[in-house]
Image: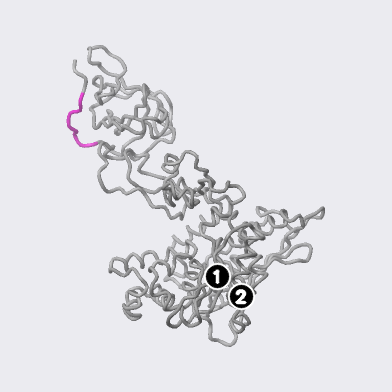
Amino acid sequence: MFPTASDSRATGQRKIVLWVPNWSVAALASAVPAGAPAATVVGGRVHECTRAASRLGICPGMRQLTAQSICSELLLIPHDPVRDAAEFEGLLQVFDQLVAGVCAIRPGLAWAPLPAEARWRKEEGELIQSLLEQCVSETGIEVYAGIGEGAAAAVGAARRGLILPAGQSSGFLRDLALIELVDYLPEEIQADYDEALNFLQLLGIRRVSQLLELGRTQLVSRLGTVGEKLWSLAEGGDLFVRAQATAAPQIKARYEFTPGVGAVDHALLGVRRVAQEFVDLMAGKGCVAHTLIVRLELSTGLESTRRWSLFDLTQSAQLSQRIIWQIRSWQDRMQQSGELGEEEVLLTAVSLEGTDVVTQALPQFLWGDKPQSDSVNRAVAQLQLLLGEESVRQPLLQGGMDPRERVELVPWGAQVEPVPREGEWAGSVQESPLLLFDQPPLAKVLGQQSDGTWGQLWINRRGILTGIPARIAVLEERPELPSGGYGVGRIEGMWAVRGKWWALRQEADAARCYLRLQVENSVDFLLIQRGQEWRVEGLYLQQAQPAPNFPLAER
């Protein structure tokens, strides 16, 4: 029989949960050899990794280069949320065969309300066992499943393979770490709770039992709506309160494709329109839906229906993302099963319906619109939807030895932990220039050498400049820097970065030297030397303060 757990009382809906850890990697089971170290990457960092990779010390958030240095045989695969969602559809179909009302939370996690017949006949253990066996037999993927009341308790039970007795989920939650109340949520929702959890940890509150001891009044007074949701989850409740009205407003939107479309790319414009229409309908009726039903209508007369929950339905970009996931899932399923045959099956319409509707006014701002940052985020999200997650990037400041290491371009909205800027960075370039060239122009540093002759100057292996610089010859034209000769006033700084001795000379992590020079009638130049080659790395906004003497080769 399936194990059970006990204690206390819960208020949330009783659910059966299907969960697959590290779904991004599990979805690649057919492409990754059994037992091989593999990881999905995004923005140059590890997103998820297999158990074999974890045993070698590789973990999510680690830089890709670091992971490769730990394991040279590591199989790296770009993270693709659309692919993950499409692969998850196979498990959702198995879930559909056993339980009605299956709702996808994110790729790798889904739940459904527990059938009343299963509770009455005490067949919960048999239901779980059937789900586990059918998932393995039909998809080859091992899953976890469990039953509990409320969102956090049900997911926690699935992670441990438990069936929580009715009314005892809140007692089960008391022993869990506080982070388990929200760590299963999609990233965009989970981010809303990060600041609150950090604040509670500073107060020494790290477990659910400690949160309950604090009291609801104290929690809500300090954290507002977020605190109220955390309290509901801690008691075994759900993330929203169901509407009490006898007739909740109907939220429905539909878009027809004329003619029908057969590829995701061709459906993007229609998907964006129907998603925005749905959001506008909610705003106009002063209500919010917490569950989305997406129906894809096909040219054969068939429909593909899926429920989605636990995301912000007021954001059209998040709606569009889930619709695209479902379209991709339908396409892949048709191709794999051979159902397409000779007849071309097209998508003719997309219908959206909101359920679990709560009547409440959406937030209105003083001047009748949302802040500019919201508009920017929506525009960027639409670009990423059309062109891919990597299409829009933002600079992330972090610690590093030189100006390029201190800035990393990451996908807009990605949750990336930067390298700490605090601490000792001995020998690092002290100040970053205003402008860094994407393609640094070739240059020569000329001056009087230690033997009294005139020629090119270098920083030798001892970190000593071989003469006194007098001119810089810029050999390549750039819009920000004309080619030609520039007179040198004085040396403002000199740094040698050891880098990686095994790296090739032109690689970013190879050994290199930096030289900051004051230029006559211009701003300061930052030059970089790699081997026997100088380039202008960047330009400063203004001249530096007089610098101390730097080591020069003796004459």
- Say which mark, if any, is on residue 233: none
Question: N-terminal of the two: label 1 or label 2?
Answer: 1
Which is the main secondary structure of the residues drawn in magenta?
A: loop
* Residue located 30% across and 34% down the image: 523
68 on left or right of 517 = right
Q: Residues within 10 Å of mark 2 (few under 14, many from 20)?
A: many
Residue at the spot of label 2: 251
Looking at the image, residue 301 sits to the left or right of residue 85; the answer is right
Label 1 Cα neighbours within 10 Å, binned few <14 / some 14-19 / many ≥20: many
Q: Report the quarter where the C terminus lies.
A: top left
Percent x, y of residue 329 = 65, 58
In the image, residue 79 sits, relative to residue 129, either above or below, namely above
Q: Position of residue 427 (x, y in %)?
A: 26, 36
Instruction: Find residue 498 and report its horizontal and vertical position in percent.
Output: 31, 32
Three-letter residue code for mark 1: Val
Q: Residue at x 34, y 33 (%)?
A: 499
Q: Is residue 545 magenta?
A: yes
Q: Secondary structure at mark 2?
A: strand
The quarter of the displayed image where residue 429 is located: top left
Give the magenta-colored segment's residue range: 544-551
- Residue 172 inside the magenta-drawn segment: no
Residue drawn where x is 33% and y is 42% of the image: 400
In the rendered structure, the answer to whether residue 480 lies left or right of residue 276 reads left
Q: Nearer the viewer, residue 115 or 260?
A: 115
The label on residue 17 is: 1
Rendering coords of residue 346 (x, y %): 75, 58
* Residue 142, placed above or below residue 115: above
The secondary structure type at the circle numbered 1 is strand
